[in-house]
Every structure is written in C-alpha cells, then in structure tokens.
Image (tube, rainbow, N blue to C red):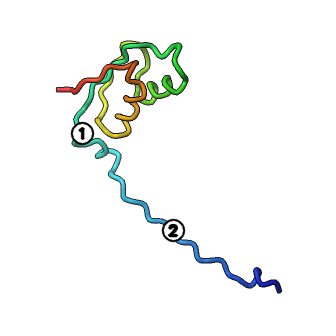
Amino acid sequence: MPEAAKRKRPATRTRTRAKRAPKADRGAGQRPLRVQQVRSGIGHAETYRRTLRALGLRHHQHEITVHDTPAVRGMLRKVRHLVQVREEA
C-alpha cells in the first residue's frame, strides 16, 4: 500500500461565526439619514445604477430614510455625485 494512502486526513474543524444582531436590531441606535437622488443614473456606469437600486432609490428626486451604517456609508460614497444626504432631525 502506498505511503500516501495510509495517511489519514486531518479532522476538519467547523468555524464558529460571530453572533450577529437580529435583523430587527441592526441599525438600532444609528441616526437616520435622508437620502435624495438628485441626478439620474442614466448615462452612468452600471455599478452606480445598481448601487442606487440597492439603497432603495428608484427614480430621480426619490427620497428615502436609511440607517447610518458603514455599509450604507460606503454605498453613499460611491454615488455621492448622484445623491444628496442630510441627517434626519
């Protein structure tokens, strides 16, 4: 029997994931932001249009409220030339 066939495979370990907050609690405690699409996605890259859709902006002058999270901040930074952002009072 070849030497390689005699060796056993190492036991696989399962990774433990960090516990995530329940969906209802995600974004809780974050200040809300008002985001308004001030320029159209037409004529811009497909990634910009997909980012606008992911934020929930459907058309020009559409306004939404989102929680201020790092993920949302990243999306807003990508399309900062197409949107206007202000803190909701």
x then y, percent, for residue 71: 38, 39
Instruction: Check whether the beta carbons of the residues at disc 2 and disc 1 lie within 8 A of each other.
Output: no
How packed is label 1: few (under 14 Cα within 10 Å), some, or many (20 or more)? few
Task: Give the residue at mark 2.
Answer: 14
Task: Give the residue at mark 1.
Answer: 30
In this orientation, which residue lies closer to the viewer: 6 or 81? Answer: 81
- The quarter in which the N terminus is drawn is bottom right
Q: Amino acid at mark 1?
A: Gln
* Number of numbered markers: 2
x then y, percent, for residue 77: 38, 29
Displayed quadrant of residue 40: top left
Q: Where 72 sits versus 46, above or below? A: below
Q: Where 38 sits versus 46, above or below? A: above
Q: Amino acid at mark 2?
A: Thr
Residue at the image position 43 percent from the left and 19 percent from the top: 58
* SS state under label 1: loop
Left or right: where does residue 74 sit relative to residue 9? Answer: left
In this orientation, which residue lies closer to the viewer: 56 or 52? Answer: 52
Q: Where 3 sits versus 30, above or below? A: below
Residue at the image position 37 percent from the left and 17 percent from the top: 37
- The quarter in which the C terminus is drawn is top left
Residue at the image position 22 percent from the left and 27 percent from the top: 87
Displayed quadrant of residue 2: bottom right
Residue furthest right as drawn: 1
Displayed quadrant of residue 28: top left
x then y, percent, for residue 33: 26, 29
State the separation of the CA atoms marked 2 and 1: 33 Å
x then y, percent, for residue 16: 44, 65
How packed is label 2: few (under 14 Cα within 10 Å), some, or many (20 or more)? few
Left or right: where does residue 89 sit relative to residue 72? Answer: left
* SS state under label 2: loop
Q: Does label 2 or label 1 sit earlier along the sequence?
A: 2
